Structure formats: structure tokens, C-alpha cells
Image: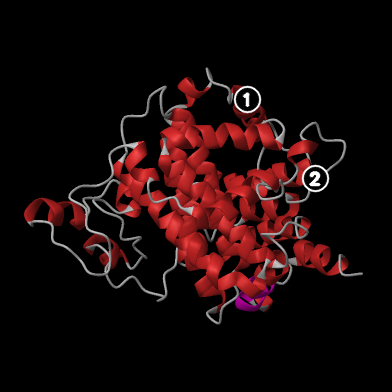
Amino acid sequence: MLRRSHKKSRGGCIPCKRRHVKCDECRPTCLLCTMSNRDCSFASDAKGSPQTSSPAAPTTSSPPSSSANALEEINLKHMELLIHLTTTNEMFNLGDDIGPYPTGIAFALKRGLDSPYLLYASLAFSARHLAYLHPERSAEFMHQAVTLQTRALALFNVDKLRVDRSNCVAILLFSAVVGHHLLADTLMERSQDGLSGFLKRYVHCARTHRGLYSIMMTAQPLLMGTELEPVLSRSISFTSQDPKGMHCQTFRDWIMQTYSTTREEREACLCAIRYLQLGFDALSPSSRHYSMQYQMLFLWSVLVPPEFIAMLTVKQPFALVVLAYYALLLHHGRHMWQVGGAGEYLFGMIEGYLGSPFVDWLEYPRAAIRGSRH
């Protein structure tokens, strides 16, 4: 989740303020307005008032319009990030491989030369990983991560064009890198605002990543004719198969039998449960998708229906129980750097919030998480 030095966006656009969501303040149109197809007040401000210089930031007469202009700001301080990005293969351990890591990252960096937003996003995620690896330099790397990712999103907003064969691969890779970064920020955060704070960050992460993912999906026919076709085909095969396991069956039956939810809410929960079961299925060594055993930890947030995310915003109890099962899936990936104890942490907050009325509903994930301690 993008954060500056303060918790609230003081200079956010009017639509984001009205919706009480954090604006990334990117101009001429912020990312959330772009993703939700809203008229951003920044765009109208830009049309109605002349540009003025600001002592706090470099003055430009217009946004960067070429790769060369955008890349002028890359300096020697970024070399550490670039070297780390090219030599550390655990950064994207929740995703699908694009061939051998050195080949895949070289492919992405080459695309980044033509699409600078991808290059900045990659360097930002490298900084985020270094902040985890080196706590003594965490503040320095986190500052780089936020600065570079904000720059990446600003460039992506400025350069948003009709998706075509020339930019579809870069947009897919950008969606993946930003998604990994947002999820890592969300799962690694430990603050005093409890479940409400976590849900606010998670919902922001899910909606932003889903917006980028939706843009990318419009280019799927084009992408199937690129070097990424094997990766996409493997991912589609994984997410479109029928669930096989019984990890979520008892809870699924309860959802089917309850009359305290609307049909839309029930269908949203069942869809979310389906993808969770696919994630549990992939954990089995006998699964033909065992090589993708942790990919659902990353993909689940963009595959669940928007209606389910909306249920989380109001702490709908059945949606929270589904999220508790996602916490168990996260717990299976606790050795991953960006996950760690997030699963147990999230489950504990949900269990405490729902209390005794939902003790039975949470029995399976509770037993599985607590049993793993021994």
C-alpha cells in the first residue's frame, strides 16, 4: 500500500476525499479515479489553471512523454536496487516464473527501457525487498520504495494509451510487479489499528491491483501471441480448473444453507471459496499445478468478485470467515519473506472480532493454524 509520511492524503483529489480512500495524488489523474473510471479533480485543475513552479519539487512544463526523458532521473543510487533485482530470485516467489529468473528479469528490464513505468516499479519492489532484508537501513529503502513506486504510477497515468501489441506485455508485467509490492506492504504491516486498519489496507490493495489487472485482461488476446503465452496459458489452466479438495466443504455447505445473506452475497462468497480451494489443492505434491502452489496467495485478491471486497469493507461476518480461510492459505506460505506471520496475525484479529457466535465456523482454520505450531 502506498504511504507517505502521514496516514491521510492531505492533497488528494476531491472524488477520493468524498469516498474516504487514500489518493496517490498522481497527476493529471490519480490511479483510483483511473481504475474506477471517475472524473478526477486533478484533471480539471490542470485544464483550468496555469502550471506554477513549486519549491518542493522539480518544475516541468509538461509530464514526461518519452522514455529518454523519464529515465534521466535514474542515478547511481539506484544501481544497488538494480543489482539486487537481477541477482535475487526470491522477490517474486508468490508468482509464476517467466523462465529462468535471470532470463525473465532481463526480459522485463528490456521492456522497461521502452516503458519506464515498468522499470521504476521494478526498482521500487527491489527497494521494498531490501528494506525487509536490512532492518538497519529500512527507513532509507522504504523511502526509495515509496518514491519510485509513486513515480511509476505517475508515469503509467501519463502514458496510459490504448492497449495494443506494442505495450500489452509491459502493462502485464507492470500489473504483476505493482501487485506484488502492494500485497507485500499489506501483509507486512503491523499497526495499532487492528482489523479495521488491515481491512482498509487490504481493500485498497485489492481494488488497485484489480484495476491494473482489468486493464491487462483487455489485452489477453494480444498477449497470447507474445513470449508470455506459456505463462498465461498455465495460469488460466490453474484458475479455471474444478476444485478437488474438501478443505472448505463444511463452510461452503453452511453458506449454501444459510438464509441470512442475499443471493449476491452468497454467490460472491462461494466464488471466493472456489478460488481458495484451488489454492489448497495446489499445495498437494500430487497436484499437476504443484509448481504454482503459492500463486493463489497472490492472485486471490484480483480473482474474487468486487461484491466480496465490498462485503469486507463493512465487515460482513461471512466474508470475514472466508478471509479467515485465506489467512490459513497465507499460513501455508509463512516461509515466504512477504508473508511471514501474516496468516496467524490476520486469523487472530478475525477470530477476536467475530467472537463466540462463529466459533464453529472457524474451527477448521483455527485447528490447522494452531496445529502447525507443534
Q: Is residue 310 visible in this depiction of the protein? A: no
Tags 2 and 1 touching, CB below 8 Å: no
Q: Which residue lies furthest to the front in this view?
A: 76
Q: Is residue 193 visible in this depiction of the protein? A: yes
Q: Could you say where residue 113 lies in the image, as x and y percent from the top left?
A: 45, 35
**Mark 1, residues whose alpha carbon is within 10 Å: few (<14), some, or many (≥20)?**
few
Query: Could you say which disc has been placed on residue 233 in the image?
Result: 1
Q: Which residue is drawn at 8% across and 57% down?
A: 49
Instruction: Determine whether the residue tagged by mark 1 lies in a helix, strand or loop.
Output: helix
Instruction: Look at the picture and state if 110 lies above or below 366.
Output: above
> Label 1 amino acid?
Ser
Q: Could you say where residue 326 lies in the image, as x and y percent from the top left?
A: 66, 57
Q: Give the range drawn in magenta.
A: 348-354
- Main SS, magenta region, reads helix
> Label 2 amino acid?
Leu
The residue tagged 2 is 283
Query: In front here: 328 or 184?
Result: 184
Q: Could you say where residue 226 lies in the image, as x and y percent from the top left?
A: 53, 20
Q: Residue at x 64, y 23 (%)?
A: 230
User: According to the image, what is the colour scheme of the structure?
Assistant: secondary structure
Q: Residue furthest bottom?
A: 192
Q: Could you say where residue 141 lies in the image, as x and y percent from the top left?
A: 55, 65
Which of the two discs, 2 and 1, labels the residue nearer the N terminus?
1
Q: Which residue is drawn at 46% across and 67% down?
A: 314
**Where's the C terminus, which quadrant?**
bottom right
